[in-house]
Image: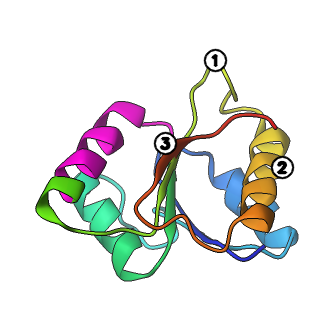
Amino acid sequence: MTLRFYLDEDVSFRLVKTLRKAGADAIAVRDLRREGLPDVEQLAYAASEGRVLVTYNRTDFQRLDAEWREAGRGHAGVLWAAERTIPRRDIGGLAAVLQQISDAYDSLADLCLPLTFQ
């Protein structure tokens, strides 16, 4: 895996452990005790660290992505999942999709993309 991930607080912490076991560079909001901070601060942190933000909060992060594009701000990428596509409890499936994306891309800079099974 080449991408570095930052998991939002709405993503199971078990995913961090699964990704790390697979050799991924993954951290979570919980690791850094950043729970409850506004989404804009979470995205700013991920951007400053060159980490792709992984979330189930599609609506807010799509809006932030649009605002940042308009303002000329960049980020390392946002990947969002939907409960109906990849349920939160499907840790293995979510980890597999993230591994596929990481193996396929060196960068997701300034992209805001849905996570789906390939």
Task: Name the residue carrying label 1.
Answer: 84
In primary-sequence order, the first of circles 3 and 2 is 3
Q: Which amino acid does label 3 sit on?
A: Asp
Kind of residue at badge 2: Ala
Residue nearest the observer in this picture, 107 or 11:
107
Q: Is residue 42 above or below residue 15?
A: below
Sequence-wise, the earlier of marks 1 and 3 is 3
Distance of label 1 from label 3 (alpha carbons): 15 Å
**Image quarter for residue 5?**
bottom right
What residue is at 58 percent from the left and 71 percent from the top? 107
- Left-right relation of 55 to 48: right
Q: How far apart are marks 1 and 2 (CA)?
A: 17 Å
Q: Is mark 1 on a helix, strand or loop?
A: loop
Name the mark on residue 51.
none
Q: Which of marks 1 and 2 is nearer the N terminus?
A: 1
**Which residue type does callout 1 highlight?**
Arg
* Quadrant that contains the N terminus: bottom right
Mark 1 and mark 3 residues within 8 Å of each other at the beta carbon? no
Circle nearer the viewer, 1 or 3: 1
Q: Is residue 11 above or below residue 78?
A: above
Q: In this view, does 59 lie to the left or right of 56?
A: left
**Which segment is the magenta one?**
55-68
Q: Please name the predominant secondary structure of the magenta segment in the image.
A: helix
Q: How crowded is mark 2: few (under 14 residues within 10 Å), some or many (20 or more)?
A: some
Q: Where residue 108 sits in the image (x, y, percent)?
A: 54, 64
Q: Name the residue under label 3.
A: 10
